């Protein structure tokens, strides 16, 4: 496989430019690592909260069904003939 243009450009840079490029590259690598760690932490936190939310939703559904059971026979917004 042949050498890329980036490798040839790097070799032709002055030592100061190489040092600047290396610092820039290291800073971007660190930023990418921190960003990836934050994304993974958010995914883990989100996966833990889904289970508890589903359990809460199931509990609330049961309570709302029993509270709405007497009102099911009536239609809302319609005058009653009683």
Image (tube, rainbow, N blue to C red):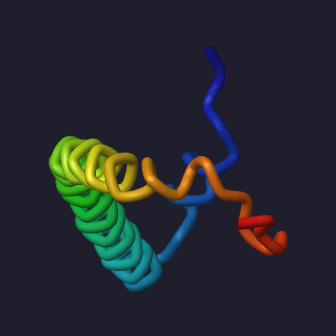
Residue 77 x %, y %: 80, 74
22 vs 55, left or right, is right
Which is nearer the eye, 59 or 6?
A: 59
Write the residue at 21% across / 53% down.
Answer: 56
Q: Quadrant of the N terminus?
A: top right
Residue 19's quadrant in the figure? bottom left
Tell me if I can see residue 4 in this picture: yes
Residue 45 x %, y %: 19, 56
Tell me if I can see residue 40 in this picture: no
Which is nearer the eye, 47 or 66?
A: 66
Which is nearer the eye, 14 or 25?
A: 25
Residue 3's quadrant in the figure? top right
19 vs 74, left or right, is left
Write the residue at 39% across / 47% down.
Answer: 65
Write the residue at 43% across / 74% down.
Answer: 21
Q: Quadrant of the C terminus?
A: bottom right
Residue 16's quadrant in the figure? bottom left
Residue 72 x %, y %: 57, 49
Write the residue at 32% across / 48% down.
Answer: 66
Total marks drawn? 0
Residue 4 x %, y %: 65, 37
- 25 to 3, vertically: above or below: below
- 12 to 31, vertically: above or below: above
**Which residue ends up furthest to the top in the rendered image?**
1
């Amino acid at each position: 496989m042949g050498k890329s243009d980036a490798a040839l450009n790097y070799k032709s840079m002055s030592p100061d430019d190489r040092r600047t490029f290396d610092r820039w590259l290291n800073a971007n690598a660190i930023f990418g690592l921190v960003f990836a760690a934050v994304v993974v932490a958010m995914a883990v936190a989100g996966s833990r909260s889904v289970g508890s939310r589903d359990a809460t939703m199931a509990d609330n559904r049961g309570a709302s069904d029993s509270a709405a059971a007497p009102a099911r026979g009536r239609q809302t917004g319609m005058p009653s003939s009683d």
